[in-house]
Image: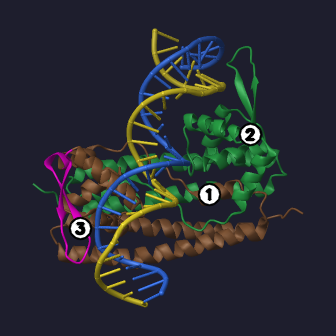
Chain colours: A brown, B green, C yellow, D blue
Amino acid sequence: MLKYAILGFLKYRPMFGYELKQAMDGSIQHFWNSKLSQIYATLKTLEAEKKLLSKIENQDDKPDRKRYTITQSGIADLDNWLATPLMTLSQTKDELLLKLFFGGSLNKSDILMDLRLMHKLHEDKLKVYQTTTKEIIQASRESHPEWKNDTLLWESTRRMGEMYEEMYIQWLNETIQNIEKKWKNKK
Amino acid sequence: MLKYAILGFLKYRPMFGYELKQAMDGSIQHFWNSKLSQIYATLKTLEAEKKLLSKIENQDDKPDRKRYTITQSGIADLDNWLATPLMTLSQTKDELLLKLFFGGSLNKSDILMDLRLMHKLHEDKLKVYQTTTKEIIQASRESHPEWKNDTLLWESTRRMGEMYEEMYIQWLNETIQNIEKKWKNKK
DNA sequence: ATTATCATGTAAAAGGTTACATGATTTG
DNA sequence: CAAATCATGTAACCTTTTACATGATAAT
């Protein structure tokens, strides 16, 4: 799927690999994260498949870079994927839940410490959606009024990030309270 | 991580690969799903590492099967993982959000149809958490009163599934309403 | 008759992470 | 003086999915 994320961004304008990574981190990172190394590998594949073209650009003060442009075949591939309805739900992998599920033999203070650390990380993430991410979308809306549908959808995905974090924090509070009340330490 | 899920289940009692898959589907599947083929491969690796032992059992009417038992070394490995605090959040991959983010050029009725199908799937999943999953945990609580901490944690992970689906449905409703109100079809 | 369940696995491919390598410029 | 940013990538490894293969019994 990273393939389609790349095609999706390059449909707006040509970009460098490094730049794509930054664009992803500022927008889709909360539901589709990828490492730079994987982005470079996928760019290579897409170029071999003629979905992209690249051109090396020299810079005086900074390293050379490769500008990738989407081809007609790339646009067709992307549009075809967008038009295919999803029939199944994506599945989550959550290591905290996995550890919690098997954590019955741990002691109360350790498990609570873990949950409180997660609580902090989720609050930090929530703040990012409510400030930075919101501002990026707001700025796009103002500078590109022709992207009305696009920014509406971007805002929807941001809102999901916000709602997810709010839900997670609420669940952590519930879970912490439950453990505080009902946990029996073994001796 | 599947490795720890397997060790986690086998700490309760010895099981067959096929049985492990069923146990996972009835409990951790919503935050850690794996295919049978991967479970068999991981069992093989764990046995080679002496974290598990296996014994072939013959059955008259059904195929032979392999019963896996956890070793001391396996228990130590699991407990060590459980005691190591998590420092980062797991990241989600959600194909619906990815498609939505790049779906600005689609037409209104197609995008709404997609969202309504997802709505149905999430409602179905929610019902499973509220009935089947809840009953499985309830039954364990009654038949194994010594698993008090365990069932408390299982219920917490079930509750996360429930809250997640409720949140997702709410977000879908919001998003559908927004698109109905604000989407401009291109000609 | 066909599909589902029980029960095991292998093989190939795809997807993803971690570590390594280079090297200049800018910021703290 | 160290760390971050810009910019590219490779190689090894690990994880996960998909497809194939076998074969019996039970249910629809």
Label 2: few (<14), some (14–19) or many (≥20) C-alpha neighbours in 10 Å: many
Q: What residue is disc 3 on? A: A64
Q: Residue at x 17, y 45 (%)?
A: A73
Is residue B166 highlighted in magenta?
A: no
- Give the x, y percent position of residue B126: 53, 50
Q: In the rendered structure, which amino acid carries the disc numbered 2? A: Leu
The residue at 66%/57% (across/down) is: A99
- Badges 1 and 3: C-beta atoms under 8 Å apart? no
Q: Residue at position x 77%, y 61% from top?
A: A106
Q: Quadrant of residue A29?
A: bottom left
Q: Is residue D6 above or below residue D16?
A: below
- The image's mark for residue A46 is none
Badge 1 sits on which subunit?
Answer: A
Q: Nearer the viewer, mark 1 or mark 3?
A: 3
- Viewer-nearest residue: A138 or B77: B77
Closer to us: A34 or B105: A34
- Find numbered disc 2 in the image and state the secondary structure of the residue it sits on: strand
Secondary structure at numbered mark 1: helix
Does A54 lie within the magenta span?
yes
Instruction: Locate the C terminus of chain B by quadrant.
Output: bottom left
The secondary structure type at the circle numbered 3 is loop
Q: Quadrant of residue D27?
A: top right
Q: Is residue B155 visible?
A: no
Residue wearing tag 2: B52
Say which chain tag 2 marks: B
Q: Earlier in the sequence, mark 1 or mark 3?
A: 3
Residue A97: mark: 1
Q: Toward the viewer: A76 or B144?
A: A76
Q: Which residues are magenta?
A: A50-74
